[in-house]
Image (cartoon, rainbow, N blue to C red):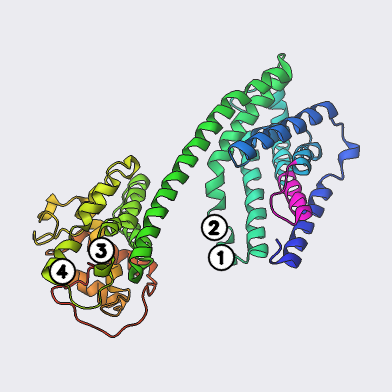
């Protein structure tokens, strides 16, 4: 908010005024203040624990407030949490106002939709499955309002283009908020039952356990990403001429995998494979990686050991799965003239055939110490020429179709140097 303070502060002020407008009917409605106070304190406590221990936001109590309280009263539930929670980065005042106004508007909108569809009576009567309909509509309204507000702050404060400011926000939030909404509905129904609020609080116990499991998964995933980043940075430092190559090979591998219709888990594995395919270069002498002239046969044999070095380095990293096979075999060729084992055709793992095409494509479209970058179309033509002998035609076709739809913007990864012909290089321009 500091970088674009005037626009950001104006946007936050407008959202805050809108939230205050939603509170205007409060003096004229019958508000169960004890329930409002209990839900507000409970939400503040849950937010403190969740943000401190797990990260993220805990919505079940907010949505329970939308199902139990009149809309203006429900909008007050997030205020104590916003005022009491610490602010890590300044400026503190607009950040606190944003933390209060954003969820207040969302829960107000959810409560309005829920009450308009008769959700209050369904909750009081415990009328299932009818109670799910207004609750689902309220959750959708909650997500839509958060999406509109978050996209707006991204566009105004962060300068994200309007075409991308809201992209993906709703789809990413709908499923987790729906789960929180179901828990909030269970809280509301138990709250209105003869067992009272104490029974409603029990709903939070399994939610907290599931949240902890979810947080552990994300921490493990973050650790995986940190491991990969560390390995890639080490390769980039050692082989400065190809800096950024690994990430782009990962991107091209993902394009091929998606074009082939692979599931999301496998696409992620292919991304890892592309990013780490050259990690074995850490075991190759730096003078060979940065040599400008042609390699001698002995030097080439040393460099051709890098797939085996890489495979040994990642052997114990279990989450990589079949990516380890891609690291070992991405320099094999369909005609059996590749390395390290000279595998032929279908003997080469599919993931390695994907990475081989992605690797060669980026190598040709990036400037190296021994030759300049080729245009994308020239690289595609070369891949098609070598399809069936060096590369799998399916992978080449998938990359070609993906490039036709999404395009490619290669980055020059080395300083411009005079063109030199390297004796014995594969015709595709694949890297050493």
**Nearer the camera: disc 1 or disc 3:** 3
Q: CA distance from mark 1 to mark 4?
A: 39 Å
Q: Residue at x 53, y 54 (%)?
A: 168
Earlier in the chain: of badge 3 and badge 2, it is 2
Q: CA distance from mark 3 to mark 4?
A: 30 Å
Identify residue for label 4: 386
Rendered location of residue 193, percent (x, y) = 70, 17
Rendered location of residue 393, percent (x, y) = 18, 62
**Nearer the camera: disc 3 or disc 2:** 3
- Left or right: residue 286 versus residue 346 is right
The crowding category of the residue bearing disc 3, from other C-alpha atoms within 10 Å (few below 14, some 14 to 19, many at least 20), is some
Q: Which mark is residue 163?
A: 1
Helix, strand or loop at mark 4 = helix
Identify residue for label 3: 285
Q: Quadrant of the C terminus?
A: bottom left
The part of the chain drawn in magenta is 85-104
Q: CA distance from mark 3 to mark 2?
A: 45 Å
Q: Which mark is residue 167?
A: 2
| The residue positioned farthest toward the top in the image shown | 194
Query: Is 365 inside the magenta-drawn segment?
Result: no
Name the chief secondary structure element in magenta: helix
- Left or right: residue 15 versus residue 60 is right
Rendered location of residue 108, percent (x, y) = 74, 42
Earlier in the chain: of badge 1 and badge 4, it is 1
- Left or right: residue 31 versus residue 201 is right
Q: Is residue 325 above or below residue 60?
A: below
């Amino acid at each position: 908010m500091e970088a674009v303070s005037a626009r950001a502060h104006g946007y936050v002020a407008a959202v805050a005024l809108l939230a205050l407008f939603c509170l205007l009917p409060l003096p004229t409605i019958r508000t169960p203040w004890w329930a409002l106070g209990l839900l507000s304190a409970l939400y503040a406590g849950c937010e403190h624990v969740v943000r401190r221990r797990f990260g993220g936001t805990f919505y079940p109590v907010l949505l329970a407030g939308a199902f139990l309280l009149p809309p203006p009263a429900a909008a007050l539930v997030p205020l104590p949490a916003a005022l009491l929670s610490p602010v890590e980065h300044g400026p503190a005042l607009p950040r606190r106002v944003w933390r209060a106004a954003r969820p207040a508007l969302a829960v107000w909108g959810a409560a309005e939709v829920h009450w308009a569809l008769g959700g209050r009576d369904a909750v009081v009567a415990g009328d299932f499955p009818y109670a799910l309909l207004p609750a689902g509509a309220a959750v959708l309204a909650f997500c839509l309002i958060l999406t509109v507000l978050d996209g707006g702050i991204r566009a105004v404060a962060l300068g994200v283009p309007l075409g991308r400011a809201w992209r993906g926000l709703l789809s990413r939030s709908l499923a987790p908020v729906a789960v929180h909404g179901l828990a909030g509905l269970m809280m509301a129904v138990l709250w209105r039952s003869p067992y009272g609020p104490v029974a409603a609080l029990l709903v939070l116990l399994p939610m907290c356990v599931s949240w902890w499991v979810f947080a552990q998964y994300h921490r493990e995933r973050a650790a995986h990403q940190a491991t990969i980043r560390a390995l890639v940075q080490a390769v980039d430092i050692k082989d400065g001429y190809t800096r950024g190559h690994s990430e782009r090979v990962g991107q091209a591998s993902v394009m091929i995998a998606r074009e082939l219709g692979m599931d999301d888990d496998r696409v992620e594995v292919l991304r890892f494979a592309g990013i780490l395919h050259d990690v074995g270069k850490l075991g190759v002498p730096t003078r060979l990686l940065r040599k400008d002239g042609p390699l001698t046969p002995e030097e080439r044999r040393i460099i051709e050991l890098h797939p085996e070095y890489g495979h040994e380095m990642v052997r114990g990293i279990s989450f990589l799965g079949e990516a380890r096979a891609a690291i070992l075999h991405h320099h094999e060729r369909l005609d059996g003239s590749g390395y390290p084992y000279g595998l032929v055709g279908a003997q080469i793992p599919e993931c390695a055939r994907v990475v081989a095409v992605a690797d060669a494509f980026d190598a040709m479209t990036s400037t190296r110490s021994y030759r300049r970058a080729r245009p994308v179309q020239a690289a595609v033509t070369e891949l098609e020429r070598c399809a069936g002998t060096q590369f799998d035609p399916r992978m080449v076709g998938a990359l070609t179709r993906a490039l036709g739809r999404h395009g490619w913007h290669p980055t020059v990864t080395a300083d411009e140097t005079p063109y030199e012909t390297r004796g014995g290089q594969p015709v595709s321009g694949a890297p050493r």
